[in-house]
Amino acid sequence: MSLDRRPFPADAAHAPLLRLLLAQDGSTTRICEALTGAAVQVVLHHQAATRDVPAAVRDQLGGNAWLERVTSLCADDAVMMDNLSYTRLDAVPKWFLAELERGAAPIGHLLDQLFVKRESVEAPPELRARLWNVVGEIDERASRSYRIVTPDGPLMLIFESFRAAMVRHA
C-alpha cells in the first residue's frame, strides 16, 4: 500500500490545531476518529518483543522486556500520525498484549479499557531516530512523547508525530 505521508503544515493557520494535538492528554486515536468522522486504519510497520531498547525506555518504564511497535494511523490512504511505542511486557494484562499482537486495534482503543494517566516526557534522539528510520519524513516540530502509567506503575512509552492529513480532516 502506498501511503501519503507529509509533514504537518508549518503555516500559521494550522498552528492552533498543532498546539491542541501536542497539549492534549487523552486518546489521539479518538481525535483522529473525530476529525475523520469514522474509524481510522492502523498500518503496522514493525512489531517485535525485544530486550534491545534505548536507555530512555528502561529509565521511563523499568522492566527487562518490551514490545516495540511502529504504526501509522491513516484515513483515505493518508497518514494522520506515525507512532513508536514500547510496552513493558511484565506489566501489561494478557488480553491487552494479545490485542497488540493482533495488530488491528489502535492503542487508544485498548487504553480506554484501563485506568491510565499520560505523562509528558522528553524523547531523546535515539528514540526519535527509531521512528524516523522506519517511516522517514522527520518532523520534530509536530512530535511529542509521553508515558502511560497505570495504578500499578509505568506501562508504555510513546513517541508520535502528527502529519498533514490531520489538517485535511480538520
Image (cartoon, rainbow, N blue to C red):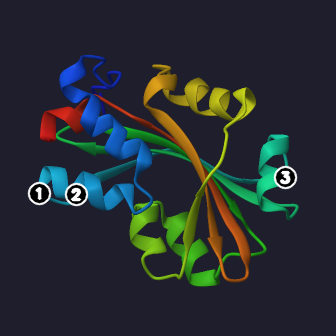
- Is 112 located above or below residue 6 in the figure? below
- Left or right of 119? Residue 51 is right
Residue at 67% from the left image edge and 38% from the top image edge: 123
Residue 128's disc is: none
The residue singled out by tag 3 in the image is 59
Q: Residues within 10 Å of mark 2 (few under 14, many from 20)?
A: some
**Residue bearing the label numbered 2:** 33
The quarter of the displayed image where residue 142 is located = top left
Q: Is residue 140 among the parts visible in the rendering?
A: yes
Relative height, residue 147 to residue 139 (above, below): below
Nearest the viewer among 161 and 121 is: 121
Look at the numbered discs 2 and 1 and tell me whether their residues touch, using CB distance below 8 Å: yes
Hey, what amino acid is under mark 3? Asp
Which element type, helix, strand or loop, lies under badge 1? loop
Q: Quadrant of residue 64?
A: bottom right
- The answer to whether any part of residue 78 appears in the image is no
The amino acid pointed to by label 2 is Glu
Residue located beneath label 1 in the image: 37
Residue in the image at 60% along x and 24% along y: 133
